[in-house]
Image (cartoon, helix red, strand yellow):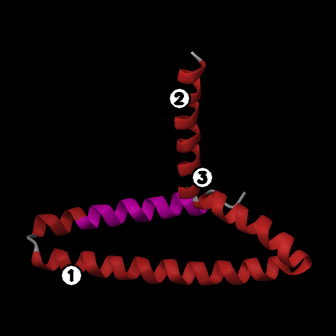
Amino acid sequence: MKRKFDYYRTLCNSAFVVATILDLRLKFKFLELSYTEIYSHDSKMHLNKFHKVFTNVYYEYANEARNLFKSASDLDDSNSSKIEIANDCILDSFRKFASARNFNE
């Protein structure tokens, strides 16, 4: 019985570890903790600098991805471009939702 319990407990722990790694909110919290330990009083300044860099990299990546989808839809028929427009609407809705929520807490 204990062997079975330990087996399933390790599976559950692995799932939580994977979720933690993939959850950017937790990664940023870890970064806040680390920067506070390393820089103490200057941690806010360094976190803001990192946040700007990360945001710029994200938007650059998002624009490249959007351009790839746009060029691919030019090759496809008009139905696929309608799907892309719908996907953009969904992404815009999610961005509004995410900006309305405070994910940094």
Give the image location of residue 34, x and y in percent: 78, 68
Give the image location of residue 78, x and y in percent: 11, 69
Q: Main secondary structure of the magenta part?
A: helix
Q: State the residue at coordinates (60%, 52%).
A: 20
Question: Looking at the image, do the residues carrying marks 1 and 2 touch, with CB atoms under 8 Å apart?
Answer: no
| Mark 3, residue position | 20
Residue 8: assigned label: 2
Within-10-Å neighbours for mark 2: few <14, some 14–19, many 20+ = few
Q: Nearer the viewer, mark 3 or mark 1?
A: 3
Is 77 covered by the magenta stretch?
Answer: no
Question: Looking at the image, do the residues carrying marks 3 and 2 touch, with CB atoms under 8 Å apart?
Answer: no
Q: State the residue at coordinates (53%, 50%).
A: 18
| Mark 1, residue position | 71
Q: Nearer the viewer, mark 1 or mark 2?
A: 2
Within-10-Å neighbours for mark 1: few <14, some 14–19, many 20+ = few
Which amino acid type is marked by label 2? Tyr
**Residue toward you, 96 or 17:** 17
Q: State the residue at coordinates (33%, 77%).
A: 66
Which amino acid type is marked by label 3? Thr
| Left or right placement of residue 105 versus residue 13 in this view | right
Q: Earlier in the sequence, mark 3 or mark 2?
A: 2
Answer with the quarter of the image where residue 46 lies.
bottom right
| Left or right placement of residue 31 versus residue 44 in this view | left
Give the image location of residue 69, x and y in percent: 26, 75
Which amino acid type is marked by label 1? Ser
**Residue toward you, 55 or 74:** 55
Magenta part of the protein: which range?
84-99
| Left or right placement of residue 47 versus residue 79 in this view | right
